[in-house]
Amino acid sequence: MHRRFIVGLIILHLMMGCTDANEAFKASIGRKWACPPPWILWGGNCYRAVMEDLTWLQAKEKCTKEGGFLAVPRSLEETDFFLRLLPYRFWINCNDFDNEGTWKCEDGTNGVEFRNWAAEEPNDNHGNEDCAEVYTGKWNDGTWNDQPCNVIRRAICKAATSPRCTF
């Protein structure tokens, strides 16, 4: 009985060591990056499709509450991944709130230069389209459109991976 307790303490100590600064130990047991369910690992980040119908602000708040942020694609490859994850129109973290016609896209707190606007977009139709969505469907897969922020869409959240130790 006493032996099991000691072995248990040793194992617990080793597991805790995976998250400290002991690099030699971490290298000896291995380290993988992981995403908690229902998040999906892709390209070194975690992603999650939000299947609820939400306004842009609600989608942004939902992602924050889930431990991430409203995603925005940084490339065509990431766009393709998003379309496999969520084959419906969805919000992305782009808006022109600060200056009409000047679109700001953020990946967390980092600016994103990649843009994939559909032909003749953004057009600020009716003067109130300040949030961006990704078109899906037969003719517009992956291109962007500006929409009023109170329109209901789904979303994709993005978060950093977390370390997971393997023995």
Image: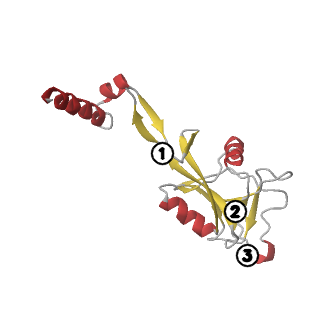
Disc with the residue nearer the chain's start (1 vs 2): 1
Q: Residue furthest left?
A: 2
Marks 1/3 in contact by CB < 8 Å: the verdict is no
- Can residue 158 be seen in the rendering of this structure? yes
Distance of label 1 from label 3 (alpha carbons): 37 Å
Q: Is residue 49 left or right of residue 61?
A: right
Q: Report the quarter where the C terminus lies.
A: top left
Q: Is residue 156 left or right of residue 87?
A: left
Asked where in the image residue 1 lies, by quadrant, the reply is top left
* Location of mark 1 (residue): 36
Q: Amino acid at mark 1?
A: Pro
Mark 1, other Cα within 10 Å: few <14 / some 14–19 / many ≥20: few
Task: Choose between 88 and 125: the one closer to the eye.
Answer: 88
Is 34 above or below relative to 85? above
Q: Amino acid at mark 3?
A: Asn
Is 37 above or below relative to 33? below
Where residue 80 sits: x, y (%)? 72, 43
- Can residue 92 be seen in the rendering of this structure? no
Where residue 69 sits: x, y (%)? 54, 57
* Location of mark 3 (residue): 128
